[in-house]
Image: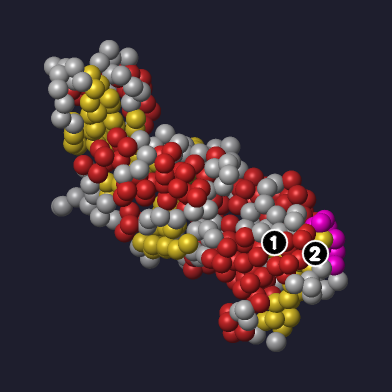
Amino acid sequence: MKRIGIALLGVGNVGGGVHDLLASNNVMAKRARIKIEIVAASARNLRRARKRLGPGVPVHADWREAVAADGVDAVVELIGGLDDALACAREVLGAGKPLITANKALLATHGGELLALARERGAGLYYEAAVAGCVPAIRTIRDALAGDEIESIVGILNGTCNYIMTQLAREGKGFEEALALASELGYAEADPSLDVDGWDAAHKAVILAWLAYGLPLAMDRIAVEGIRGAAVADRDCAAEFGYVIKLLAHVKDHGRRGVETQVAPALIARSHPLAAVNDNLNGLLVRTRYAGELLLVGAGAGALPTASAVVADIIAAARDGAPPALPFGGKASARHCARINLGSQAYLRVRVIDAKGVLARISQTLSAAGLSIEAIHQQESHSGAEVDIAILLHELDWAALRRTMARLAKMKQVVAPPVAMPIIIPHIKDE
């Protein structure tokens, strides 16, 4: 049986989960005939970490001491954040050792540098747990679909946001109430901004865009919008049309026009399987040219689900040595990320004072901009009351829609800024 000694940097929820999996005589490791031993660790809370790991594992306050310990063959980085994690990654890969990480922010912001260093030093960089927890998103795109052409990826990649949106849709709760419940259940951090403002999902989307299309690992070209403004009115209007709203990462190839890469609330037909991915689960829909559609669903976070992906990467490091760092022959594509919304339908909601001729004027404004209406729903109301008008639009130019929304906002009967969302997965129309 092959042995691999690891330095475990970070003994929080996931790091503790890695220890627990290994301590339970992990079946996968036995099947692979690999003995994994934690030979050193680092942690912020030394007392808690030593209690969790037991007396046989030295725990250091400084991660450098753990990395330099005798018998360390690979390093598991679960520190989080950027500064220490980046310094650690540079040191480990620079020494030619495998690095296993769940740090999506690190990869999304400094991945290009780290991948180049891994190639230069012949070191393995493993990051399955960085996207969608235990869902094998990375291996599916990088390995299983290596012989195919990926047309698009649609992902529910943040369990906190998905839980909140599920509470809005299924339980009728408002955003603040749903967020408070997510915090009580441990799904949301003390500061939930990274999740609810869309940046956690954006980090993962950048990694997926790199894997699928060789785009540079960079955050500066991705369009990001979170769910902080999620409204009950949109939930209700979307339901009238047979849709649900999810925070979606959307990566789509438009050839020479670029690769659409964005994170935003969007509509999915309620009949589609991805719409049934609820609570804190993650889901990934990959459309390919030859294999068709693949749907991956599972726990996107949590100590043991994420730890299972980390342990699988440790086994891969022991087996493989140094896998290819890039799936595109070592060169990133010259194509760019862009918020394009080509070929997308849209949902539009306009809150107005109900008065004669308002709907007709909105319709005329949309028509004059070349925006074609598929369906309209207007709430029942009394003259003079505020009412929401919800409109489904055919495939459109989003720049034209944004200009039209600005014109609609200036109408005296419109009482709030209009809201628009892409329809990423529309209803299947009868031929």
Type of the residue with mark 2: Val
Above or below, 379 relative to 126: above
Where is residue 201 shown, x and y percent of the image?
A: 51, 47
Side of 81 relative to 388 (left or right):
right
Q: Nearer the viewer, residue 96 or 334?
A: 96
Check disc 1 and report the residue beneath it: 11
Span colored in magenta: 61-69
Picture quadrant of residue 396: top left
Where is residue 235 shown, x and y percent of the image?
A: 30, 40
Above or below, 396 relative to 24: above
Q: Nearer the viewer, residue 129 or 426?
A: 129
Side of 3 relative to 280 (left or right):
right
Where is residue 325 shown, x and y percent of the image?
A: 65, 60
Type of the residue with mark 1: Val
Q: Nearer the viewer, residue 259 or 257?
A: 259
Q: Which mark is residue 59?
A: 2
